[in-house]
Image (tube, rainbow, N blue to C red):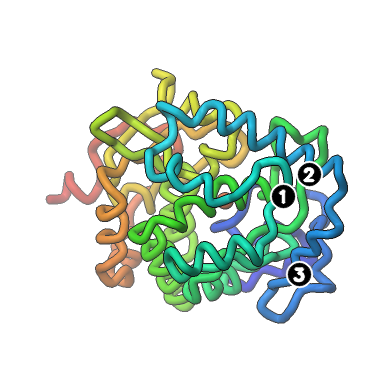
Amino acid sequence: MNPQPDFHSGVNQGVAPVTYGQGERPPRGDYAQARSDYTCDQQWQRYTAAEHDLYRRLYERQAAQLNGLACEEFIAAVKHLGAPDRVPRFDALSEALHRATRWEVVAVPGLIPEEAFFALLAARRFPVTNWIRTPEEFDYVVEPDVFHDLFGHVPLLFNPVFADYMQAYGEGGLKASRLAACEYLARLYWYTVEFGLIATPAGLRAYGAGILSSAGELRHSVTSPQPRRRPFELERIMRTRYKIDDYQATYFVIDSFGQLFDATRPDFAPIYARVAGMPEFEADDSRDQTASNTSG
Ligand SMILES: [Fe+2]
């Protein structure tokens, strides 16, 4: 049900929590240089001037549209990434992050097996891909690159409550691996960490990294009348499939990061068992009735 993915046979197989698409091509990163925990050196000196410039253009495009669309916590923290004119050095970023929330960023060659991913999160180490997309992928890249991982994920790791949620998620992931329940937890990650929206006094805002690092989905997710937006509901999320190749059809909206963290407090084992016996929802399913509340 949940075999350890073999990244040599296809980078995305079975690594749903960090998967952005079912890529056919082999991984781009240099896995031969990675340590047993899949971390590697950033090799900052290897970035070319053109790559730094690509990072700058990606950063500027996203930064220009944050106001009114990204949550305030993200906007306040994005400055921690430093000057946007070049790819940040992970070691300097880690120093600042560690001072704020005891997290650090570590370089990885790309997607990594889920257990390795969970183990890093549980140790408050966030894996960041060390390579950047090609200029042709300026608008869309299938797998997470350094821009997605840094710009999308790292700012909120400076927020203490969100930082604790991410660690709790990693610990939950290690447990889910043993319970063959990674798929349910992957959906939780997808609909919160990657594509989550938050209701604020100023209106709906984005906090998910997949949204915040996307040129088009940031505005779409917050303002378009097209997608469905549902209040955060743990079991509904675990039963809802997601799209990896298009804007999300459904977004789940939290009230606060505290709500997110509180949702990870219960023992998920009985929840997994219950969810496993229930039908799933398609990504664009509009039904409000669920098997859990029709049966009382
Ligand atoms: Fe991501």
Residue beneath disc 2: 52
Marks 1 and 2: in contact by CB < 8 Å?
A: yes
Label 1 Cα crowd, 10 Å radius (few <14 / some 14-19 / many 20+):
many
Of labels 1 and 3, the one closer to you: 1
Specify the amino acid type for callout 3: Asp
Locate the N terminus and report the quarter of the image it occupies: bottom right
1 displayed left or right of 283: right
Q: Residue at x 46, y 48 (%)?
A: 77
Nearer-N-terminus badge (1/3): 3
Question: Is 7 located above or below residue 142 in the figure?
Answer: below
- Per the model, the C-alpha gap separating discs 1 and 3 is 14 Å
Which residue is at the far left?
A: 296
Residue 41 badge: 3
Which residue is at the far front?
A: 83
148, 12: nearer the viewer: 148
Find residue 288 and report its horizontal and vertical position in percent.
25, 35
Find residue 244 and report its horizontal and vertical position in percent.
59, 41
- Per the model, the C-alpha gap separating discs 3 and 2 is 18 Å
Find numbered disc 2 in the image and state the secondary structure of the residue it sits on: helix
Residue beneath disc 1: 87
